Image (cartoon, helix red, strand yellow):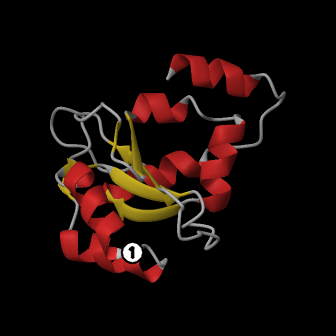
Amino acid sequence: MTPAADSSGSIAETAVDQAEFRRRLSGFGVPGPLIDDAWEIVAGPALGVLLYGSYARRAASAHSDLDLLVLSDVRTHSAESERVSVAHYTSAQLREAHQTLYGMHLVRDGVIIHDSAGVLAEILATFSPPTRISSWHAFASSA
């Protein structure tokens, strides 16, 4: 499925709903203070938001950090606080994770929290296992 584009050919980024963001992260056992820190970074429009890492796997400990990916063709800087890491990727950058270990990690463990027009799900659906282990290094050096 190809998401609908506006007249310029761009997919509209929609505001991440704060109540839904909080509800979804709480459902994975993320403590309120971590959700507050994450919201400060994530708030605003985005194509998608993905939870991954130990909270997504439901294997977090009291000292785990919170890992999020924000898909945005507008906001392209990654950010972090003491225990929150938010990686920002453009659609083109995330598509480059196809056939990488990182991409498979996102597919295996990731949980979509927000997805404007299904863009994030569409990109993740194209991912397949790497053809060779060195593809991770090529992706990591390009990000």
Residue 95 position, x and y percent, is 52, 34
Q: Is residue 44 above or below residue 54?
A: above
Residue name at image x 61 percent, y 74 percent: 58
Element class at badge 1: loop
Observer able to see residue 1:
no
Residue name at image x 77 percent, y 42 percent: 129
> Seen in the image, is 43 located left or right of residue 106?
left
Q: Residues within 10 Å of mark 1 (few under 14, many from 20)?
A: some
Q: Quadrant of residue 138?
A: top right
**How many callouts does the rendering have?**
1
Q: Is residue 16 above or below residue 82?
A: below
> Seen in the image, is 36 located left or right of residue 28?
left
Q: Report the front residue among 85 and 5.
A: 85
Residue 114 position, x and y percent, is 34, 62
The residue that label 1 is drawn on is: 31
Q: Is residue 29 above or below residue 34?
A: below
Residue 51 position, x and y percent, is 47, 60
Residue 46 position, x and y percent, is 26, 49
Observer able to see residue 114:
yes
> Seen in the image, is 110 located left or right of residue 34?
right
Q: Which residue type does callout 1 highlight?
A: Pro
Residue name at image x 27 percent, y 58 percent: 37
Q: Report the front residue among 67 and 21.
A: 67
Q: Is residue 112 above or below residue 130?
A: below
> Seen in the image, is 54 located left or right of residue 8?
right
